[in-house]
Image (tube, rainbow, N blue to C red):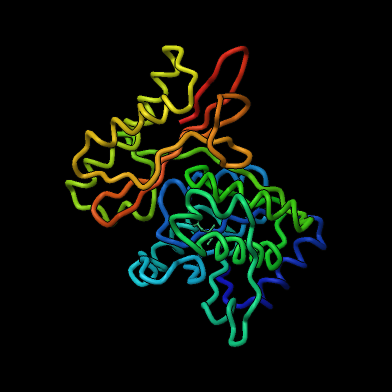
Amino acid sequence: MEIILTVEWMKQVSRLARGEGRLSGLVPTMGALHEGHVSLIRAAQQECSPVTASIFVNPAQFAPGEDFERYPRRFDADAALLESLGVEYLFAPEAAELYPPGFSSYVKVEGLGSRLEGRSRPGHFRGVATVVLKLLEIVQPWRAYFGRKDAQQARIIQQLVRDFHLDAQIEVCPIVREADGLALSSRNAYLSPEDRRAATALHRALGAAQAALGRGERNPANLAAAMREVISAEPRAAADYVEVVRADTFEPATRLSGECYALLAVFFGTTRLLDNMLIVEAGGGFRCEI
Ligand code: PAF
């Protein structure tokens, strides 16, 4: 595996791959890799060659007071893992490489970017959209892979690609979970043992919404109420938001139709975790992807 530190070097490699007509794949990450990232790498390897993974803890997507400084950094272990998986290129620029002195252009996805996560974390999606636009421009992948745990992020990136006529196809891959249902996240490492146990409330809440749906409940507000009940019953959990939204706009769903997300953002101590379930109208009913 070649570790690439500069934009110019990465662009050269990308140009070469494109010139040879190869269908390259990109898996953007902030490191602290886990099985969720591994599933993205494997999905990319099934369809693309070469595969580039990026590791960049993007300062622009952390608001002041968020966890940028303490975000887990395990570069050597991550690089060894990527190498063992057979990833061809690891793009790992320093912050000054992507944001040199005088950098002043940012991308804002309006509407979608200001709801839910955007409301709770002002500036977050501006940072995500900016860095993803950069990565797509530098690596020029045929396909780029993102996890559905960050469903709103994935939707915003699809919008970015559409709005800027970018060539990359955006693939959104299923959530990978621990045996007890907790969605894998680099931030799970922050949880105390007690909060780790309590954090199963996220998955249990989605299960409650799924069960209600199975009993014939079709009112999004009642599905959200079923989730809230589970979160409220967990003393270590403090909900930021618990909502059922339309999957295209992330606006509150007034009725279930097409594709919707049941979404949660919940604090366990100071750790804020996300989870979601996709609800798809199919064959006269609804199926859930947890
Ligand atoms: O999901 C992440 O890890 C990050 O938001 C991303 C997409 C790599 C951009 O920094």
Of residue 176 and residue 108, the one placed in the foreground of this image is 108
Quarter occupied by residue 183: top left
Residue pictured at 55% horizontal, 65% vertical: 127
Residue pictured at 45% horizontal, 61% vertical: 31
Of residue 258 and residue 48, the one placed in the foreground of this image is 258
Looking at this rendering, what residue extends furthest in the bottom direction? Answer: 101
- Percent coordinates x, y for residue 153 in the rendering: 55, 51
- Percent coordinates x, y for residue 21 in the rendering: 81, 56
Identify the image quadrant of the C terminus.
top left
Of residue 262 and residue 203, the one placed in the foreground of this image is 262
Q: Is residue 204 left or right of residue 278?
A: left
In the displayed structure, 176 sits above or below 136; it is above
- Percent coordinates x, y for residue 14 in the rendering: 72, 66
- Percent coordinates x, y for residue 276 in the rendering: 45, 37
Identify the image quadrant of the N terminus.
bottom right
In the displayed structure, 96 sits above or below 109; it is below
**Marker count (numbered):** 0
Residue pictured at 75% horizontal, 54% vertical: 163
